[in-house]
Amino acid sequence: MKRLISISTIFLFSASAAGQELKFGFNVGTHLVYRTKFDQPIFIPENSYYIYQEKSAGAGVINKTSVFNSLSVGGLVTASYKRFTLNIEPQYFFQRTIYKFKEPTETERVIGKKALRIPIYGTYKFWKKENSTYLIAGLIFHSEANYDLQNPGGEVYFVGKPYAQSTINFGDNHFYNVLYDDKPYWSSMLGIGKVTRRGLNYSLRFHRRLNTEKRGIEGRIWNLELNIGYLFLSTRDFTKKHYLYFD
């Protein structure tokens, strides 16, 4: 990880020294679609006696599509050469997903994360103009803290007393080593983007985790993310020469 970031940083500032333009800005993003699939028909967590069962044959214990379940905010540094651009985006990332289970009893799990993400990727413009459509290809580094707990729900009261007894708390971190772990990891990224005339940079990005089997992650996860960036500062702003003319 350190080596890749170092190489990218050296490239960025080498481009600046060679007369190419460095730009700085910020970006925000969210998952348009977040897909989770865990194919096992029955799952027993290592730290609990609770048993998760698929609700229908072949569905898997988890078969969920979520939308708009995340938020990322971060910076953006780009270096361009002709139609190619190298981009680095250090981001703060937050995600929250609720998984509902029907069998053997109805329960919900809240699984989320707080993370440092660093997308490192290249783009290629289809045309030479500044606001051209472009392709995206690269990697994302993730270092995250996960939480996995039973949704406490809301208590219902009648005449000042609980209407029904609370459900049993079956414990936390049931899906550790199934949907997540504590190890940093990489994911691949492919996408397409477009810069508007006002400088807003819209992109759709497809992410998929890498080396999940080696890490012991059994669930299959991918997502489609919408990202919006804006560049507001350039090295050319500091290198342009200004002249004063007197009559």
Image: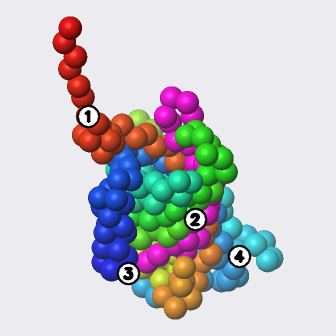
Horizontal and vertical percent position of residue 240: 29, 36
238 in relation to 74, above or below: above
What is the C-alpha distance between the residues marked 1 and 4? 64 Å
Query: How many other residues sit within 10 Å of disc 3, few (<14), some (14-19) or many (≥20)?
Result: few
Decide if residue 146 is in sight here.
Answer: no
- Name above or below for residue 236 compared with residue 63: above
Residue 60: numbered disc: 4
Question: Which residue is more in the foreground, 45 or 126?
Answer: 126
Q: Is residue 184 magenta?
A: yes
Q: How far apart, in angstroms, are the residues tagged by discs 1 and 3?
A: 49 Å
- Residue at position x 48%, y 83% in the image: 177
Secondary structure type for disc 1: loop
Say which mark, if any, is on residue 180: none
| Residue under label 1 | 241
List the residue tagged with mark 2.
137
Is disc 1 in contact with disc 4, using a CB cutoff of under 8 Å? Answer: no
Horizontal relation, residue 50 to residue 147: left or right: right
Q: Which residue is identified by label 3?
A: 183
Segment colored magenta: 183-209
Please say if 108 is above or below 49: above
Disc number lying in front (1 or 4): 1
Left or right of 37 in this view: 26:
left
Place of residue 158 in the rendered image (x, y in percent of width and height, measured from the top left): 45, 38
Q: Is residue 214 visible?
A: yes
**Viewer-proximal residue, 42 or 78?**
78
The numbered mark, 3 or 4, whose residue comes first in the sequence reads 4
Density class for disc 4 (Cα within 10 Å; few <14, some 14-19, many ≥20) is: some
Viewer-nearest of labels 2 and 1?
1
Quadrant assignment for the C terminus: top left
Could you tell me which quadrant the N terminus lies in? bottom left
Dominant secondary-structure state across the stretch colored magenta? strand
Residue 37 image position (x, y, % from top left): 66, 72
